[in-house]
Image (spheres, rainbow, N blue to C red):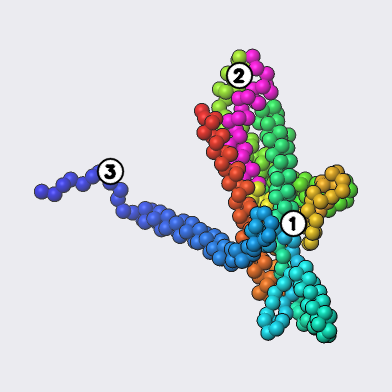
Amino acid sequence: MSEPLNPFASKPSRSRAFEKVILGLFRVATYFVLLCGVIVFADIVFKGAPTVARAFKTTSTFPYVTNTFLFTAPESLYVFEHDGEKKEMGDKEYRAFREAEEAKALAAGQPAPKFKAESYVYSAGGIWPAIVGTVLLVVGSMTIALFLGVCSAIFLNEYAKDGPVVRFIRLAILNLAGVPSIVFGLFGFGMFVIFFGWNVSLMAGWFTLAFMVLPVVITASEESLKAVPKGFREGSLALGATKWQTIRKNVLPYALPGILTSSILGIARVAGETAPIMFTAAYVVRDKLPWEIEKASDFFFQGVMALPYHIYVVSSKIPQNEYTARVQYGTAFVFLGIVALIAAASIILRNKLRSRYQW
């Protein structure tokens, strides 16, 4: 005797078959995007990591180990043959080597040796000034963007009355999120570099990048504030707290995890932008670090090197060869690591706040 059929079992139909096909397409598209991302990151890691690994050298002073790619400034590379051996030296090392060889020949009463060296720009030394400049630009711009963005979100969500003006402001914020970065770069150049007279400097770069990422911060912060239950506000007000005390004590702490999420998104965009800093903050080469200045006030009004702009210059503005290729991949590898570290710090802080403030 056969078992009775389940009346609630799904029956095959064209719509269900079509749904399975659509689901399969979505799955394939998702895996394809993930595969492309893995290939790109793997290519950068496998080609960039050796550049960093080969740069470790021992020193005679503490900490007795250094990495010339991470902690020195970029230099020209000189490739030449000496005593039948091919040598690769940076500009400083090459000049010292020539002087030593010429002094040795002079002491032996022989003519000075002639060196036939080929030079390659930005293919020796390291990226330390670019690392410092990138970290300063990210930290400074995100500090400004978070302060202005959170203040704007508090006003729009907690104080402003819903109406045509507020709705227009929200629409304008959403539209600004889609403006190309090159437009923000030209805006920053005209406003901060020329009109305010800040020239190409950290300050001009900070405000340009902050304004670029501000729409994302405002939108995410406002959504985080909306997610806090109204009962928290009503209970605080019923106990006699003021509006600002309620926001500061009972709303902001619970909205901080979402606000930090916006900072993670902002860091990823700010760190990778080239066009805005090219107009407002970045130099092609700068040997001095930002704190190596005479006046403390000049710290904010000086240009810096930056990793994305350095990659752009090395990749497109000089002749390409095997030496520039390893610098490109090495810089990209370090750049991804720095962005990942800053984003990871924000994620850890967000998770701690989530575990502390729960409802």
For residue 230: magenta?
no
Q: Mark 3 highlights which residue?
A: 8
Q: Marks 2 and 3, how far apart in space? A: 51 Å
Q: Is residue 118 left or right of residue 347?
A: right
Q: What stretch is highlighted in magenta?
A: 240-266
Q: Which residue lies furthest to the front in this view?
A: 108
SS assignment at label 3: loop
The crowd level at tag 1 (other Cα within 10 Å; few <14, some 14-19, many 20+) is many
Q: Is residue 338 above or below residue 109?
A: above
Q: Is residue 28 left or right of residue 336?
A: left
Q: What residue type is labelled 2?
A: Ser
Q: What residue type is labelled 3?
A: Phe
The crowd level at tag 3 (other Cα within 10 Å; few <14, some 14-19, many 20+) is few
Most foreground residue, 104 or 133: 104
Number of labels in the image equals 3
Residue visible at 65% across and 40% down in the picture: 219
Q: Marks 3 and 1, how far apart in space? A: 68 Å
Q: Mark 1 highlights which residue?
A: 129
Q: What residue type is labelled 1?
A: Pro
